Amino acid sequence: METMTEAQITEQQPETGQENVQQQNAAPEFPAERFGGRFSSWDEVDRYINTPQEPKYKDDFIKKVVEKYESDGTLEDFFKAHSTDWDKMDDIETLKTDFFEKEMATGLDKKVVEKLWNNKLREYNVDPDSVDAEDLEVNLAILARDAKRVREEMKKKQQEYLQPKAQSEQIDVNRVRKVVESLPETQKLKSDKKLVFDINGTPFNFAVDNVDNIVESLVDENVFRQVFISNNKVDADRYMKAMAFGANPDAMIKAFVDHGRTLGRQEIEKELKNPSQNRQQAPSMYDPKDMKENILNSFLESKQR
């Protein structure tokens, strides 16, 4: 019988230990299903993460808004474009608004710009008390010509910041106005000139002076936006408060009422701890003490129970 050498025996033995090590070191299978089949390896995932992605926008207008904010840090030009109606401005207001925007942009103080504008207006010489009728007519024509030029320039510039409307989105303002005017809420506001708030089941009437402006804001969004423009700047704090109230008026009214009650309790407690030395003593048929003091003491006792 032929005897096998030690080398032959070693060659025939399976390299079980080496295979186990290789299996342990093998990379786990790539979970392609977790990525919806978009990637087939971790290398592809890594390349995707480290490759700059081009931002995707809904449309070119949104892209313009984002780029403007990234470059200037503000969207005031867009807000002004949507809140300014150059066609509704008279000639002097048009020239003044344009003059202020340009001069304020140079860094001049508002008071200085106001003086410069007054000098500019005097150059037109349109004061009927200081010029005869014939010259006044000529001067007003010159002013109207300059205002028309500025108005057209500003309207053209304004289009850069306005969102284009599709044909189907065009609004018939007159039709909207008729609908708004026919609303029972509108008719009631116009007749009563007040708004009614529900304070824990009790109606509270709030008198309104600018009824027509409120109604018009339902028709023309520019009227609504104009409320939040002050000195040619957006009053962001006022806008945020209005939006917060509009989002949940009941909750805000309740918060105001609760705050008022808290202040009332604080005043009562302050009065109990430091009673007025000059308070007149009013006689009572039930108790010789002051009636107000009795009520305050009763309130304090109930609170301490």
Image: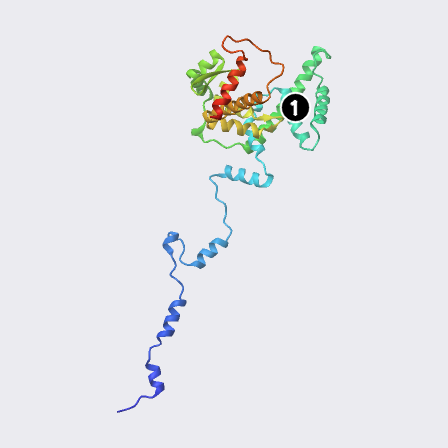
**For residue 125, which quarter of the picture?**
top right
**For residue 150, which quarter of the picture?**
top right
Is 174 displayed left or right of 78 in the figure?
left
Residue 209 seen from this side: no
The type of colouring in the image is: rainbow
Nearest the viewer among 237 and 29 is: 237
Residue in the image at 71% along x and 25% along y: 111
Q: How many marks?
A: 1
Residue in the image at 65% along x and 23% along y: 96
Is 10 situated above or below 233?
below
Residue in the image at 47% along x and 31% along y: 165
Q: What residue is shown with label 1?
A: 96
What type is the residue that disc 1 sits on? Answer: Lys
Which quarter of the figure is the N terminus placed in? bottom left
Nearest the viewer among 39 and 17 is: 17
- Taking the view exactly as shown, the residue that stands out farthest to the left is 1
Nearest the viewer among 176 and 168 is: 176
- Taking the view exactly as shown, the residue that stands out farthest to the front is 288
Please state the horizontal and vertical placement of residue 202, each as a whole percent of the image. Answer: 44, 17
